[in-house]
């Protein structure tokens, strides 16, 4: 495949967009109003980000073939 550089840029842009999407999803689920709420938000955001990265890695590895 000759467009590996373009695929790499696409992956980076999708990763940035996914960072904000998962943050918004986590915030709407937890809606933190206290310090403990913020800690819960960060934990939920981390879990969503990890699962999303795994899914994106599988999708992009299939696209790179």
Image (cartoon, grey):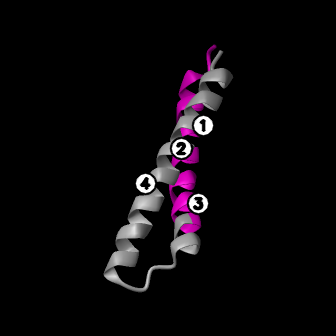
On screen, residue 65 versus residue 45, left or right, reads: right
User: Closer to the observer: label 3 or label 1?
Assistant: 1
The vertical placement of 62 against 18, above or below, is: above
Residue on which the image places disc 4: 46
In front of the other: 8 or 61: 61
Question: Label 4 near label 2: C-beta < 8 Å?
Answer: no
The vertical placement of 18 against 38, above or below, is: above
On screen, residue 27 versus residue 63, left or right, reads: left
Mark 2 nearby-residue class (10 Å; few <14, some 14–19, many ≥20): few
Mark 4 nearby-residue class (10 Å; few <14, some 14–19, many ≥20): some
Residue on which the image places disc 2: 51
Label 4 vs 3, first from the N-terminus: 3
Rendering coords of residue 7 (x, y %): 59, 30
Label 2 vs 4, first from the N-terminus: 4
In front of the other: 21 or 36: 36
Residue sitting at x 62%, y 16% = 2
Question: Label 4 near label 1: C-beta < 8 Å?
Answer: no
Q: Which mark is residue 38?
A: none
Give the quarter of the figure containing the N terminus: top right
Label 3 vs 1, first from the N-terminus: 3
Rendering coords of residue 37 (x, y %): 40, 77
Residue on which the image places disc 3: 21
Label 2 vs 3, first from the N-terminus: 3
Residue on which the image places disc 1: 55
User: In the orientation shown, which residue stands out farthest toward the bottom?
Assistant: 33
Q: Is residue 17 rendered magenta in the image?
A: yes
Task: Specify the segment rendered in magenta.
Answer: 1-25
Label 1 vs 4, first from the N-terminus: 4
Helix, strand or loop for disc 1: helix
Residue sitting at x 60%, y 37% = 55
Residue sitting at x 55%, y 32% = 57
The vertical placement of 36 against 9, above or below, is: below
């Amino acid at each position: 495949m000759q467009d590996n550089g373009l695929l790499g840029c696409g992956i980076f842009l999708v990763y940035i967009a996914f960072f904000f999407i998962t943050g918004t999803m986590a915030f709407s689920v937890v809606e933190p109003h206290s310090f403990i709420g913020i800690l819960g938000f960060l934990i939920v955001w981390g879990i969503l980000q990890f699962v999303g990265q795994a899914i994106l890695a599988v999708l992009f590895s299939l696209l790179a073939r």
